Image (cartoon, helix red, strand yellow):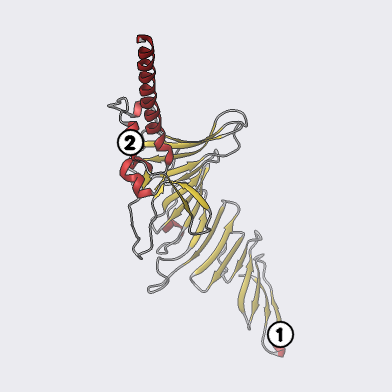
C-alpha cells in the first residue's frame, strides 16, 4: 500500500491523509485518483505506481518517458495503434545492454532507438533495431558501418563514410574522414599542420593493365572551356558545361544530361575537374615532345647553312 495525500472535490473531502508503514508516498486528486507515487528509493512515477526507475511518466497506456540512472537506461516511446501515424511509433532509447532489441524494450511497439552499448553509442531505426550509425569508444562517427572500414568490408550497396575525431596532431598528417564502399576505403580527407587534402584512392595495388596515357593533346583540343553567368546570383564563372565535358572526359562528370527526379525536378550534373589533371599532363608532355623535336629540326637547319 502507501501513505496517501488526497485532494477531494467537496468541503468534507478537501484534504485527506491516510498512512501506513510501507514507506511509499502518493499524491491523489479528484477524490482519490493517484497522480504521483514516490517509492522507498525515492523513485518517482507520474501516472503510474509501477516505477523501478528514478522517473517514470505514463500518459494513458501508450506514451511513456522513463530514466534509470542505475542501469543507464533512458527511453522515450509512443505506441501507435492500427491506423495510426504512418511509419510506426517514434521514440529514442539509451541502453547499456549490447544487442538489446526493440521488442525487449516494449513488445509490439515500433521505435526509433538510440542505444548505449558497451563502449559505443549506436543509433538504430525500425522495428527490428537496424543500426544506422554509431559513435565508437575513440570518438569516431561511423555511418552505415559498425567498425572502422578495412579492405575486407564488402557488400555495401551505397557509399558510406566515417568521421574520426578532429582532435589529432596539429603538425602531422591526420585523417578526419574515410569514404568507403564494397571495395573498402575509396577516399579520405586528411590534414597536416597547415593544409587539407581531399584524396581519392590511387594506390598501385588497386590497379591493373596500367599503360602510359596517349592522345592527351588531341583530347584537350576537344575541350570547350567557357565563361558564363550563374543564374542564381548573376556572378561570373568559368569552366565547362557538364554534358559537353562528359562527352570528352567522362570521368570528370557525374549524372546524366537533362535528368529529373520522380517529381520532375532537375537532377543537376556535377564536375570534378581534378580528373582532368592526367589528361592535361599528357597533353603538355606531348606538346613538349613536339617543341623539342621542332627545336632539334631548327638547330639542324641552322647547322646545315
SS for dot 2? helix
Relative height, residue 89 to residue 165 (above, below): below
Question: Which label was assigned to residue 14?
Answer: 1
Residue 149 horizontal/vertical position (percent): 42, 37
Residue 155 horizontal/vertical position (percent): 32, 42
Q: Residue at x 37, y 15 (%)?
A: 296
Q: Nearer the viewer, residue 56 or 31?
A: 56
Q: Nearer the viewer, mark 2 or mark 1?
A: 2
Q: Residue at x 49, y 55 (%)?
A: 230
Can residue 260 be seen here? The reply is yes
Residue 160 horizontal/vertical position (percent): 42, 44
Categorize mark 1 by other alpha carbons within 10 Å: few (<14), some (14-19), many (20+): few
Quarter that holds the N terminus: bottom right
Of mark 2 and mark 1, the one earlier in the sequence is 1
User: How far apart are labels 2 and 1 at the CA level?
Assistant: 93 Å
SS for dot 1? loop
In the figure, is residue 207 to the left or right of 78? left
Residue 144 horizontal/vertical position (percent): 42, 47
Categorize mark 2 by other alpha carbons within 10 Å: few (<14), some (14-19), many (20+): some
Q: Nearer the viewer, residue 302 or 215?
A: 302
Going by the picture, which residue comes out furthest to the front?
305
Q: Which residue is mark 2?
A: 219
Q: Residue at x 34, y 31 (%)?
A: 216
Relative height, residue 170 to residue 42 (above, below): above
Can residue 183 be seen here? The reply is no
Quarter that holds the C terminus: top left
Question: Which label was assigned to residue 298?
Answer: none
Amino acid at each position: 500500500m502507501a501513505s496517501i495525500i488526497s485532494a477531494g472535490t467537496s468541503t468534507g473531502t478537501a484534504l485527506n491523509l491516510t498512512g501506513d508503514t510501507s514507506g511509499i508516498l502518493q499524491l491523489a486528486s479528484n477524490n482519490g485518483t493517484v497522480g504521483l507515487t514516490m517509492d522507498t528509493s525515492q523513485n518517482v512515477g507520474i501516472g503510474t505506481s509501477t516505477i523501478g526507475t528514478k522517473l517514470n511518466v505514463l500518459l494513458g497506456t501508450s506514451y511513456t518517458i522513463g530514466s534509470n540512472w542505475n542501469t543507464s537506461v533512458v527511453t522515450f516511446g509512443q505506441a501507435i495503434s492500427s491506423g495510426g501515424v504512418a511509419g510506426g511509433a517514434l521514440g529514442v532509447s539509451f541502453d547499456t545492454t549490447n544487442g538489446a532489441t526493440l521488442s525487449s524494450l516494449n513488445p509490439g511497439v515500433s521505435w526509433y532507438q538510440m542505444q548505449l552499448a558497451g563502449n559505443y553509442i549506436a543509433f538504430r531505426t525500425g522495428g527490428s533495431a537496424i543500426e544506422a550509425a554509431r559513435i565508437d569508444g575513440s570518438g569516431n562517427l561511423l555511418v552505415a558501418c559498425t567498425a572502422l572500414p578495412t579492405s575486407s568490408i564488402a557488400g555495401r550497396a551505397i557509399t558510406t563514410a566515417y568521421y574520426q575525431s578532429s582532435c589529432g596532431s596539429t603538425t602531422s598528417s591526420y585523417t578526419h574522414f574515410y569514404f568507403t564502399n564494397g571495395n573498402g576505403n575509396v577516399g579520405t580527407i586528411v590534414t597536416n599542420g597547415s593544409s587539407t587534402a581531399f584524396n581519392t584512392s590511387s594506390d598501385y595495388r588497386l590497379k591493373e593493365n596500367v599503360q602510359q596515357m596517349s592522345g592527351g593533346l588531341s583530347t584537350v583540343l576537344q575541350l570547350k572551356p567557357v565563361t558564363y553567368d550563374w543564374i542564381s546570383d548573376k556572378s561570373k564563372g568559368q569552366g565547362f558545361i557538364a554534358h559537353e565535358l562528359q562527352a570528352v572526359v567522362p570521368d570528370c562528370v557525374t549524372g546524366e544530361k537533362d535528368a529529373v527526379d520522380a517529381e520532375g525536378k532537375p537532377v543537376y550534373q556535377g564536375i570534378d575537374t581534378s580528373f582532368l589533371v592526367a589528361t592535361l599532363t599528357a597533353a603538355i608532355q606531348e606538346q613538349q615532345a613536339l617543341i623539342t623535336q621542332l627545336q632539334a629540326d631548327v638547330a639542324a637547319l641552322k647547322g646545315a647553312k
